[in-house]
Amino acid sequence: ASWPHLRGAGEQFEVSAVVTNPPASSGRKKQLVPSPVQALAEEQGLSVLTPTGLLKKYPDSAEFLDAMRELAPDVCVTAAYGQFLPKSFLSIPPLGTLNIHPSLLPKYRGAAPVPRALEDGV
């Protein structure tokens, strides 16, 4: 994946960190493999945070939220993160959190919003 939105982002904006899902088991040997987002961010020299979750029930959520507060981002941008974003996260950036999504919600929601939109000719 080329991830053009992440490539060169640091040239136009100060990217404090990239947050993505933790490495997941893959293959027959079940080796931990970083997400493509993590791999590219590290290749670009960006700081990467990989919390297991943002809710209090996850053991590293408080540590993650503390790290985000320390980074003190002006704004956060989320894209296909796939986890609930609690108010404790959303309240950190003073300019808010922008959730970008390629689908036309709520019309195209569910597991495959982009393919459904393409099927409809959108």
Image (cartoon, grey):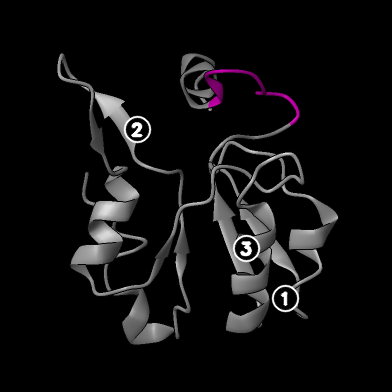
Q: Amino acid at mark 2?
A: Ala
Residue 119 percent location from the top left of the image: 48, 14
- Which residue bears the numbered disc 1? 93
Q: Residues within 10 Å of mark 2 (few under 14, many from 20)?
A: few
Q: Is residue 20 left or right of residue 46?
A: right
The mark nearer the N terminus, 1 or 3, is 3
Q: Residues within 10 Å of mark 3 (few under 14, many from 20)?
A: few
Residue 82 drawn in magenta:
no
Residue 78 placement: quadrant: bottom right
- Which residue bears the numbered disc 2? 24
- Which residue bears the numbered disc 3? 63
Foreground mark, 1 or 2, reads 2
The mark nearer the N terminus, 2 or 3, is 2
Residue found 58% across the figure and 63% down from its top? 77
Q: Is residue 57 left or right of residue 99?
A: right
As drawn, 64 above or below 55: below
Q: Amino acid at mark 1?
A: Pro
The N terminus is located in which quarter?
Answer: top left
Q: Mark 2 and mark 3: span between their CA atoms?
A: 20 Å
The mark nearer the N terminus, 1 or 2, is 2
